[in-house]
Image (tube, helix red, strand yellow):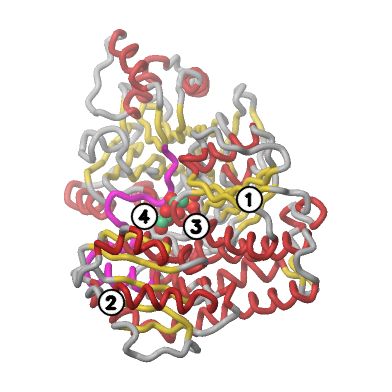
Amino acid sequence: MCGIVGYVGPRDCSDVLVSALTRLEYRGYDSAGIAVFENGKIEVAKTKGRLSDLSEKMEKEGKPKGHAGIGHTRWATHGQPSYVNSHPHSGKRVTIVHNGIIENYIELKEYLTKKGKTFLSDTDTEVVAQLLDLKYDGDPLDTIHTVIRMLKGSFALGIVFADYPDTVFAVRRESPLIVGVGDNESFIASDVPAILNYTKKYYLMNHDEIVKLTHDGVEFFDSHMLPITKELQEADWDMDAAEKGGYPHFMIKEIHEQPEAIKRTVLPRIRDNMPDLSECGITLENIKDFKNIHIVACGTAMHAGMVGKYVIEGLARVPVNVDIASEFRYRNPLVGEGDLVIIISQSGETADSKAAMSLAKEYGAKTLAIVNAKGSSIAREADMLIYTHAGPEIAVASTKAYMVQIAVMYLFAFQLALAKGRITEDECKSLLTSLMEVPDKVEETLEKVMDDCQYAGSSLVNADSLLYIGRGLDYALSMEGSLKLKEISYIHSESYAAGELKHGTISLITEEMPVIAVATQNALFEKTLSNVKEVRSRGAYVILVCDEECHIGSDVADQIIRVPKIREELMPMLAIVPLQLIAYYTSLHRGNDIDKPRNLAKSVTVE
Ligand code: F6R
């Protein structure tokens, strides 16, 4: 979490830093700050609150004026959000911004205190600033090199030295960092969208590499301080993808982008009406022998894995274990040679998912990453890699990334089922034909359910607690619906396998407990309907999500939201849309900050 940026070039540096940071606010938004060289001196402006508060403050008090500097938007880890804990942090001759966690900061702080250093903040970052200051020998590269060898944990650091005006240094370990280059200007940033206003060209930094930005260009050094050249990357996202484009929130824009995202993700992986994942390192030959699959991820990505489990087990008949990454990494999992571990991650930087992948490799399993962010750590370290092409997802609540993660789960399941001889080529073609219909059906769903979901949102606005129920794939989907609702509306909700209600949870049902039931699977429909009757007869207000062809009376539930019909294995890709929209509208009616929900950040690069 936290976003860092840096700039050296002819433009007004404060403006560039603030504009770049706006694209990173999804990473944290409890304080913000910049440091800019003004007439050769480092000037700092920072505040508790959002970037808009920083801009307001600089408007009133004046902004630093110059052409090189660093900036930060924070998601607090060490010390509460406050002015003193805001970045940048300084020693006498060094000022820094930091994303990550310094695990040994307490012992370093003791060491520095003994050396006479004093501290203003509670942060681990100030410890690094003071350490750089202590070790500074007049040579920034040498100093950074010495200091990072003393640090344990994760960091991306933007660093300016008072003795080196208009020069920005940066280094990373574990935390993400890119270096953008334009005409006579250069940037550092935690993520690509930050620089898209200025350039699409960027370099990826490896662990412990150092970069130096000056008005003459950028220079890279490896972990032994030897100069290196790097391969230039080009972003395939444009600025529109990182703007709201007329929508009131990124979340609703991203919900509407789902049909295109599915097309971008699925179509290039189809050849002659058959799945073709060979560019991702996956062939029929190299997946046919996997006996066990583990899907490991966090939050929404883990819920995509739950859908994957049902689909892979159903079609390919291979056992799939879905694990929360933070559990998997600490429970000595039963994983080994011959197993496949699939890591799903939008950001490709989630600390627990990354650690889970390293563990899986250590245990001898093959790893497959399903990742949205190009060049991210998880993408770079996996044995096989399928990129989801959702484009930049800015809203903290994930929608389109989830949708394409599921799309990839289907593609992979089809390929594996074929490799295992569980489906014929014709069956595979027919499944793919249906998958290709999904984008249009999602479009249709959006048109069809929008008003219903606004209405549902208004009826849930005063609820204190909610249950989502479903069976099979609908249960997997309910988990995601429930997470979406709680993260942005702040209403407590849980998802339950509908058949499990009567084993305890049904005691919670009263008129005060609305229930959202998802019933899109034919074989389970009647069963779920019985559960709907059970909760209604105990007073619950029920919203039922089903397909438009199911034959039920309008009095079966208090509100029925019907989505278009597609073959039932693929129904999650349509039924998730109303669940996303219900969360969105409930949050809207409650007046919440939808794109930046409290206490959250999009990229969880700390444990
Ligand atoms: C919820 C959400 C989170 C993420 C989770 C994993 O809307 O976005 O639950 O899914 O933090 O993040 P990634 O996919 O980046 O590993």
Is residue 584 inside the magenta stretch?
yes
| Viewer-nearest of discs 3 and 2 | 2
At horizontal 56% and vertical 37% (from top left) the residue drawn is: 333
Q: Is residue 496 above or below residue 50?
A: below
Q: Is residue 239 left or right of residue 537?
A: right
Q: Main secondary structure of the magenta part?
A: loop
Disc 4 packing (10 Å; few <14; some 14–19; many ≥20): some
- Labels 2 and 4: the sequence-earlier one: 4
- Given contact means CB atoms under 8 Å apart, are the residues at marks 3 and 2 in contact? no
> Is residue 91 shown above or below 381?
above
Task: Identify the residue position indicated by label 2 in the image.
Answer: 536
Q: Amino acid at mark 3?
A: Leu
Q: Of the residues tagged 2 and 1, which is closer to the observer?
A: 2
Residue 166, quarter of the rendered image: top left
List the residue tagged with mark 3.
Answer: 196
Asked if residue 29 is positioned above or below residue 258 in the image, the reply reads above
Distance, label 2 to label 4, CA atoms, is: 46 Å
Q: Nearer the viewer, residue 232 or 138?
A: 232
Residues packed near mark 1 inside 10 Å, few (<14), some (14 to 19) or many (20 plus): some
Distance from disc 2 to disc 1, alpha carbons, whole Å, reads 56 Å
Q: In what element is the residue under mark 3?
A: loop
Going 67% across and 65% down the picture, which residue do you hit? 315
Residue wearing tag 4: 22
Mark pair 3, 4: CA separation: 12 Å
**Is residue 182 visible in this depiction of the protein?**
no
The secondary element bearing badge 1 is classed as strand
The residue tagged 1 is 233
Sequence order check, earlier mark of 3 and 2: 3
Q: In whole angstroms, how far apart are the C-alphas of marks 1 and 3? A: 13 Å
Q: Which residues are magenta?
A: 580-607
The amino acid type of the residue labelled 2 equals Arg
